[in-house]
Image (cartoon, rainbow, N blue to C red):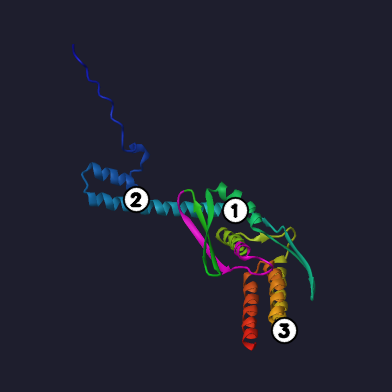
Amino acid sequence: MSTEIIEAPQRELAAPADQVPANSPMGMMMAAMKQGATLDQVEQMMNLQQRWEEREAEKAFNDALAAFKSEAVEIIKRKTVDFTGKNGRTHYKHAELSDVVEAVGPALSKHGFAWSWKTHQEKDLIRVTCILKHRQGHTDSVSLEANADQSGSKNNIQAIASTVTYLQRHTLKAITGVSEKGDDDDGLGSANSKISADLRDEWISEVAKAETLERLETIWQEGGNVIYATNNLADYNAFKKAVSDKKKMLTEAQ
């Protein structure tokens, strides 16, 4: 009785030659291995392949971002601010984080992008980094930082969450290069800037006139909420510094 040994066909380990461009680093590396290239030579070719892939990923990222910016993305200001102060009625709208995400999300996904945030806190200073990643691997990021928002009647967790949300909104707009647009905002951008500056000056004036720590705390609570709602981080920080300086002055005078 004889036994016939049937050998199973060997599995192809290397990628088919027609799937690897001959002039790519991988194609050249495969050709070199067939010709007996040394390990050092193969390692150098692998490094070359990695750099080549990174450059291709960056080009794909830039092309996709350009395509994204050709989309008609509009961030509608849905949050209404409406109050009456010493200078009369103040009424305007601004966007919240959900408005920004709803506006840019579908277009970003369409062009192969995903985004995420990383948050780092050191004492009261909070840093938020928005990371934009393309499906081919290239990433870009933008970071902003601010102090915890202690205005109003917020507890510590609410103060941190308020600032994180604020920075998430602005870093996502910055990394994608989009801006807010009102329903009928011809010239509204400059108008909102003037409103913010007027409010800042008005409340800083109130800070200067405060004669007690109790009065200063009231101004901080009320003015902080109003200025924060304008979405102008520079004006908010200017107001906060004025309160801090005044508090130090009143404390030393006691």
Marks 2 and 1 sit apart, C-alpha to C-alpha, by 32 Å
Residue 64 placement (x, y as % from top left): 52, 51
Between the C-alphas of marks 3 and 1, the distance is: 51 Å
Q: Residue furthest front?
A: 254
User: Is 189 inside the magenta-drawn segment?
Assistant: no
Packing grade of label 3 (10 A; few <14, some 14-19, many >=20) is few
Q: Secondary structure at mark 2?
A: helix
Q: Residue at x 65, y 85 (%)?
A: 250
Give coordinates of residue 237: x percent, y percent: 62, 74
Residue 36 or residue 105, whichever sits in front: 105
Identify the residue under disc 1.
Answer: 70
Is residue 100 visible to the viewer in this orientation of the structure? yes
Q: Count neighbours of disc 2 (C-alpha within 10 A) and say few if under 14, some if 14 to 19, many if 20 or more.
A: some
**Which residue position holds label 2?**
49
In the rendered view of the protein, which quadrant contains the C terminus? bottom right
Judge depth for marks 3 and 1 and give the one in front.
3
Disc 3 residue type (three-letter): Lys
Task: Depth check: give the residue in front, 111 or 242.
Answer: 242
Of the pair 83 and 246, the residue shown nearer to us = 246
Mark closer to the observer (2, 1) = 2
Q: Earlier in the sequence, mark 2 or mark 3?
A: 2
Q: Name the side, left or right, on which 104 lies relative to 76.
A: left
Looking at the rendering, the stretch of residues picked out in magenta corresponds to 136-161
- Report x, y in % for residue 198: 72, 75
Q: Can you name the residue that lies furthest to the top here? A: 1
**Seen in the image, is 10 located left or right of residue 170?**
left
